[in-house]
Image: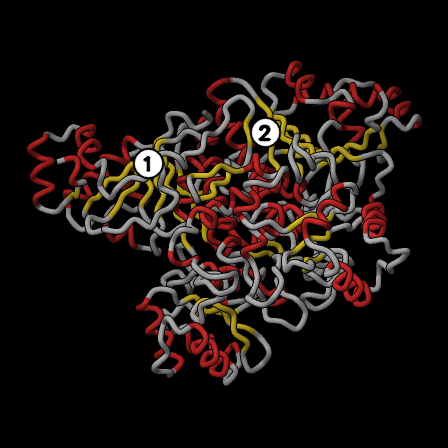
Amino acid sequence: MALKGIKVLEFAGLAPGPFCGMILADFGASVLRIDKVNNNTNLDVLSNGKQSLAVNLKSPEGIDIIKQLSKEYDVLIEPFRAGVMENLGIGPKILLENNPKLIYARLTGFGQDGPYSKRAGHDINYIGLSGLLSMFSRVNEKPMFPANLAADFGGGGLMCAMGILMALYERTNSGLGQIVDCNMVEGSSYLGSWLLRSQKLPIWGNKPGENVLDSGAHFYEVYETKDGKYVTVGPLEMQFYKELLDGLELEELDYFDFKNGKEVLTKIFLTKTRDEWSKIFDEKDACVFPVLTAEEATEHKHTKCNFMKDETTVIPKPGVKLSRTPAKTTAFKKSPQCGEDSIDVLKDLGYSEENIWNLCKKGIIKTHKSKL
Amino acid sequence: MALKGVKVLEFAGVAPAPFCGMILSDFGATVLRIDKVQNSSDLDIDVLANGKKSLAVNLKTSEGKDIIKSLAKKHDVLLEPFRPGVMEKLGLGPSVLLEENRKLIYARLTGFGQEGLYCKRGGQDINYLGLSGLLSMFGRAEEKPTFPVNLVAGFGGGGLMCATGILLALFERANSGLGQIVDCSMAEGASYLGSWLFRSQELPIWENKRGENLLDSGAHFYDVYETKDGKYLTVGAIEPHFYEQLLKTLEVEDVDYFDFKKGKDVFKKKFLEKTRDEWNDIFAQTDACASPVLGIDEVADFEGNRDKFVKKDNGIVIPKPGVKLSRTPGETQALKKRPRVGQDSFEILKGLGYSEDKIRDFNSNGIIKTYT
């Protein structure tokens, strides 16, 4: 696998960090999650196949453990507000001095400096500040955010994973690591580069919700069907637009009259069920397809090969296929209990069993009951 | 820069592939765009081409194919956006080019992938998003699903995912000495990008219909609110201690965390009492996860954003590279010139060893297009 042999220290946090670690794990890296000793619940649904060390970072012994680990690891991912790692004594300066090959990744909402860097926030705040959220709305409605996808995962986890890979690649030439600093506001804006940089093209120029690509055009929209489900319609190009009209049995429908187009299409699509429309448009190249729920996507004839299922949980397969060194999803592996691997990790570092037992008693590390 | 010395052949296509090429270029790769001879620069809508070169060549001629084959021997990465089979039909498919250059990373970025029922059909971001299972999760209750323009499939699951795949292959090649195919389908990439959304469905935060949950605009403390001046604020106060600060700052009491409906009524009225910037000033003193929704025209000037963007003279706002590498940073290419179609054809062919006479010959015969 592409990242075989790469070792990642992932400091536990909310979804973006675990998603970044998950991508690296799916492509072959070993990921060790660093948990707090008092973590009781495991809400981390992306931790399958990772290991867990639970350690008290406020103790000097705990900090020592991290320092030793970072000498033997390739990548460190931390999600804390600016200054937290420095205050603990495990900031990038110290750890990179101990291990100049280390790739020290920092994944935050607001970044390492600037007026917001010490404030709390979530995906919705980050995309609001990125300039993107202002573009996401139907006309005369308030902006609508795509759950927490854009900043947490697009501009956050995936962008950070990409940065880590850049640094890993660069290290094969230079032999050196560096800091990979990803903040979700900037990451989101960069992800939306085309949206921002295409603003002078004629497809923009109207209010949000009145342009070609943001639900203004009747030929780039979601329509409700007779059974309360939905289809997507996206025939931007004339050859596809003609097939749309064909499939709807319409003689003509002015491409440029968005308002009329929407009225007509809204009415027509309500006359048949989604699956009836799917059947009709299966015979056409009109860029009309169903909107599938997660569950349906695992069963749909085209998309089912993109997914696996673990009982009722839907699991997307790794989103890019490498022909010679393919990924292997970690989603079916066990999710670690908090501290499940603490003993093994310390043993590998050369700690004696007695020492480990003492650290346990003092609450410096936590190990899972099953390992005692 | 991280990708210094990496040479990329980018077959011209719509936004996702240029975005992928742009990322590689921002981090130091040299990108040569392969244009069709009949492409005119007057119709140039590729807003992400700054800093790239352009060779315009007729791929239907044997001389044109030979040029591509020679180039493929000297480039590290090839990126093509065509429907499955197109490159194979041209005699430039991966098995041919990888045989001639085993180190080549052959990236294929499509909507539906290389096989499956829809792989030969036309489609757009909105269709891929609909099929990914994600669109069914985006949108307010009682409304049809809302799509975030073309961000998720085209750029998140597409361009950025593909760039990640290319980097994985580049890193792997540093170990193995071999290239491979990197196959990215936007529908599948989008689903993988949304892994957490799929895999967290069993958590209590997703018990209700679309638009009625914690993170999809159901909760009053995770939504967008209109202010007195018709602008908007985002509120993301999920954690109880931030929620308390939110209530305190708004000077409201007795708004139960779990009473989404009442909460929305109260907050909606409250936020309309002041302008967005008045609210921003107030919230700047708190840790309540509330911040403004910025329009494109103001995003670069906003206090927290100044170092995240570059502004062009014509008003276009350019996001800087979304992840910062400390030692080998990326640098936006957006201030460089966009290539005229074929502007580098002459130089490229000379570099391959073609004589000036031959090049002029090719130009007259429409095998290439060059710019004198």
* Residue B46 vertical position relative to residue A211 in the rendered view, above or below: above
Q: Residue at x 34, y 79 (%)?
A: B248
Give the image quarter of residue A259: bottom right
Is A227 left or right of B194, judged from the image as shown?
right
Helix, strand or loop at mark 1: loop
Pointer 2 chain: B
Helix, strand or loop at mark 2: strand
Residue B14 % position (x, y): 72, 43
Residue A190 % position (x, y): 56, 51
Give the residue type that dot 1 points to. Lys
What's the CA distance linking mark 1 and mark 2? 28 Å
Q: Is residue B372 visible?
A: no
Residue B185 % position (x, y): 62, 37
Query: What residue is pinned by disc 2?
Result: B182
Pointer 1 chain: A
Query: What residue is pinned by disc 1?
Result: A334
Q: Residue at x 66, y 38 (%)?
A: B112
* Residue A107 vertical position relative to residue A124 in the rendered view, above or below: above
Is A67 left or right of A59, judged from the image as shown?
right
